[in-house]
Image (cartoon, helix red, strand yellow):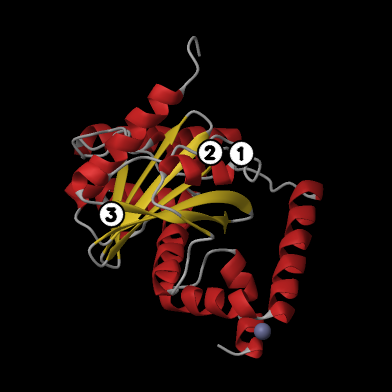
Amino acid sequence: MTCQELRACLDAHLDGELDLPLSLAADEHLAFCAGCQWAYAQERELRGLVRTRFPREGAPAALRERIRGALARAEQAAGVGVPRRWAYWAVPAAAVILVALGVGLWQRSAPPPVVRELVAKHVMYSRLDAPAEIVSPSEEAVSGWFKGKVRFDVAVPDFSPSGIRLVGGRLADLTGRQVAYLLYEKGRSLISLFAFPGRGLALPSGEGTSGRDDRFYVAKVDGTEVVVWTQGEVAYALVSSLDRESLLECADTVWRLVVSRKPPGV
Ligand SMILES: [Zn+2]
């Protein structure tokens, strides 16, 4: 991708509207081009300003209620669940389509932008020769490296019982927020574990999905499995070309580790 091409799709990239190959090409360009990095940062800052000065108007309350009612009725009729958070940001037109098509189908075919961005990052890092900033097989060393770099406790799970080894970690970015990124590998498969503050992000939830375990949202994007969940203030995402069962096992390991690390009485 050239600078000119990048500038042409900068807006769409910031909006998370590019398809996966384009989004990857843009990220690759941004990784080495200082000029475009600057343009990207400027544009993002400008958007932040616009958002805080001119908050977007929400849908009228009565309309929101009607949509929620319609979604709830469709959910009952179809016997499938709509993850609660989705209902809030569904635009009226999308809500009508949802009801018409059946929410399950739509949800499977169109993962939210944040999920696609996570997959894009996973694919991008898996193409780099040395994606980790700290390379260490020690959970303690990697966890310690993040101290003072991110504003949350980074739990570094041990997946070795499943034959998955820790490679290391790095800092990453997700729509302007800081992400602790952990890399694991099994054979030639890379397993990405992202941890980031979940507040204010339109994250999907496993609630009401047909999966066996409603703690986790699961999706498959371009052949890559994604598991997303939130524990307290921190959201987690596992992304890999491994099979879903293995990834859910890993998710359960992280879940239990995070629970065990909570200070008593909280
Ligand atoms: Zn450039």
Task: Indicate the secondary structure of the residue bearing disc 1.
Answer: loop
The residue under the point 71% across, 78% down is: 34
Q: Is residue 97 above or below residue 148?
A: below
What residue is shown with label 3?
Answer: 108
Mark 3 lies on a secondary structure that is helix
Three-letter amino acid code of the residue under disc 2: Leu
Q: Nearer the viewer, mark 3 or mark 2?
A: 3
Q: Amino acid at mark 1?
A: Pro
Mark 3 beta carbon near ligand 1 (under 8 Å): no
Q: Amino acid at mark 3?
A: Arg
At horizontal 46% and vertical 35% (from top left) the residue drawn is 66
Badge 3 vs badge 1, beta-carbon distance below 8 Å: no
C-beta proximity under 8 Å, tags 2 and 1: yes
User: In this figure, which residue is indicated by the disc labeled 1?
Assistant: 60
Question: Does the image show residue 121?
Answer: yes
Q: Point out residue 237 in the picture as x, y percentages from the top left corner.
A: 40, 47
* Nearer-the-camera pick, 244 or 156: 156
Q: CA distance from mark 3 to mark 2?
A: 26 Å
Q: Is residue 47 depicted above or below 11 in this figure?
A: above
| Marks 3/1: CA–CA distance | 28 Å
Decide which of 114, 30 is in the foreground and name it: 30
Q: Is mark 1 within 8 Å of ligand 1?
A: no
On the rendered image, what quadrant is the N terminus found in? bottom right
Give x and y (percent) for residue 143.
50, 41
